[in-house]
Amino acid sequence: MSMATLTAPSAERENYLNQEYGIRSWLLTTDHKRIALLYLLSITFFFFIGGFFALLIRLELLTPAGDLLQADTYNKMFTMHGQVMVFFFLIPAVPAVLGNFLIPIMIGAKDLAFPRINLLSWYLFIIGGLFMLYTILTGGVDTGWTFYTPLSTQFLDTHVVAAALAIFIAGFSSILTGLNFIVTVHRMRAPGMTWSRLPLFVWSNYATSIIQVLGTPVLAITLMLVALERIFKLGIFNPQMGGDPLLFQHLFWFYSHPAVYIMILPGMGVVSEVVTCFSRKRIFGYKFMALAVIAIAVLGFLVWAHHMFAAGISLYAAMIFSLLSYFVAVPSAIKVFNWTTTMYKGSISYMTPMLYAFGFIGLFTMGGLTGLFVAALGIDVHVTDTYFVVAHFHYIMVGGMVMAYLGGIHFWWPKISGRMYPEAWGKLAALIIFIGFNLTFFPQFVLGYLGMPRRYWQYSPEFQVLNVLSTAGATILAVGYLLPMVYLLWSMRYGKVANENPWNAAGLEWMTASPPPTFNFDQTPTVTWEAYNYDELKEVPVER
């Protein structure tokens, strides 16, 4: 089916163009694209709240003495930074924004399988966010983002129940989104869109959805038990009342390690789309790439206790979980190898999305390699609860997932907004973020190896130079994150109008208008080509 056929004017599209654009039409919409934009606004808000807490943390660590924040306040800063960033930005970012917007279009569907449930998932996210804001404004919580017991079950004046309720509600938003994606991919693919023709972005979000549906209820039940223990003085996790704090860690990490892949798998899907487009080549080893995301989702459920090597678990269990942790690195390595091979002898265009993809591959690889260190029992005992673990986690989550998220936003921004952004500013922001990130977190590897513990508001003076470098990097990183918000908003009014396919990319989403009409396609497309048919699209993208 030709592009002209897919984008021909229709009565439905005219009605869409003439519809009311008031607040009510947005708050009651069932259009997956509008819901994606509602998520975009929401998670951007929480990103800057979490970033503000991070800035306070780095300013406190500028000097060895605790001279900016009190100890209790510092505890609340790193707790709320983690909770906001993990549960209200990192987990929903790519699936809720880019997945919501793109998955139906990529598979040739008119919408997600359950449009009203999709809207409900956003409302649940907002309700959970409001509880988190209540927690922040009324004094915060100081247990660490992991809610470790007995800290979270001690009956102190801290808002553990409100924070747990916030994440409990947001978890149901995640479950509903995952369920919606699974049913949509199974039931609503266009004719000819076989499993072997699905874009890898869809495969990645499909695997992520499986983790969301199977893993999130475990976290929800765990946090509910913490709240019940605090309210009714039950002895579930508190050892003073006969409870078992290690049981909490097992339950929490059974979800929270797979949650790492909820955050990173969609980013891998973004990078697959960007690399193949700007290399002008089919993705190398498509079937292995698809199988790798499923393997990551499955193996991710088998390695949770590597977070507990220093917690007192059986040595034999620790050895098994250490071995399994090495296995889960294999499918991730396959993906990095295949991205690199795809670029080999490709006609590479160094556009903004591709720069973010380069950043993702480099930083994710660094984070993955240091993950092998913490999977080794001997080294993990030394670096547990030091800044080495902080740096490793952020290389995966911030260096990996946030780079992929920004790369995806830039890649699909012409499709989302119908406008092009200033390419020079995009490249500058990508460079600033890459430099700022490495200056922020690489010194923390050294700090952790030297023995600086995390979550301390004071530290030994010999660590100050590296902490000053880290704080300087965080300042640069903040500038890099602010820039895209400025020029993307500018582009919505003043940017050059984008055509249907400004990158000359493969995929159904590039065969409809920019932005797409209400039901994406005026006629259901029939797919007759293989995924990533760049051998039929020889033109190289032109800088704009």
Image (spheres, grey):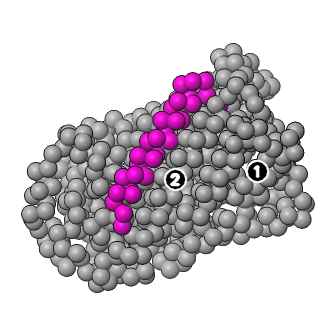
Q: CA distance from mark 1 to mark 2?
A: 21 Å
Choose between 460 and 167: the one closer to the eye.
167
Choose between 341 and 512: the one closer to the eye.
512
Q: Quadrant of residue 211?
A: bottom right
Q: Is residue 248 above or below residue 22?
A: below
The percent coordinates of residue 90 (x first, y second) are 52, 48
Q: What kind of residue is marked 1?
A: Gln
Residue ID for mark 1: 249
Q: Main secondary structure of the magenta part?
A: helix
The percent coordinates of residue 395 (x first, y second) are 61, 48
Is residue 168 inside the magenta stretch?
no
Query: Mark 1 or 2 closer to N-term?
Result: 2
Q: What kind of residue is marked 2?
A: Phe
Judge from the rendering whether residue 8 lies leftward or rightward of residue 93; answer left or right.
left
Q: Secondary structure at mark 1?
A: helix
Choose between 280 and 421: the one closer to the eye.
421
Residue for point 69% across, 18% down: 70
Is residue 123 inside the magenta stretch?
yes
Q: Secondary structure at mark 2?
A: helix
Q: Which mark is residue 172?
A: 2
Choose between 157 and 269: the one closer to the eye.
157
The percent coordinates of residue 215 (x first, y second) are 61, 60
Judge from the rendering whether residue 147 lies leftward or rightward of residue 242; answer left or right.
left
The percent coordinates of residue 142 (x first, y second) are 68, 31
Q: Quadrant location of the N terminus?
A: bottom left
Q: Is residue 373 visible?
A: no
Range covered by the magenta-colored residues: 113-141
Q: Is residue 537 visible?
A: yes
Q: Which mark is residue 452?
A: none
Residue for point 80% across, 25% down: 460
Q: Is residue 109 above or below residue 93?
A: below
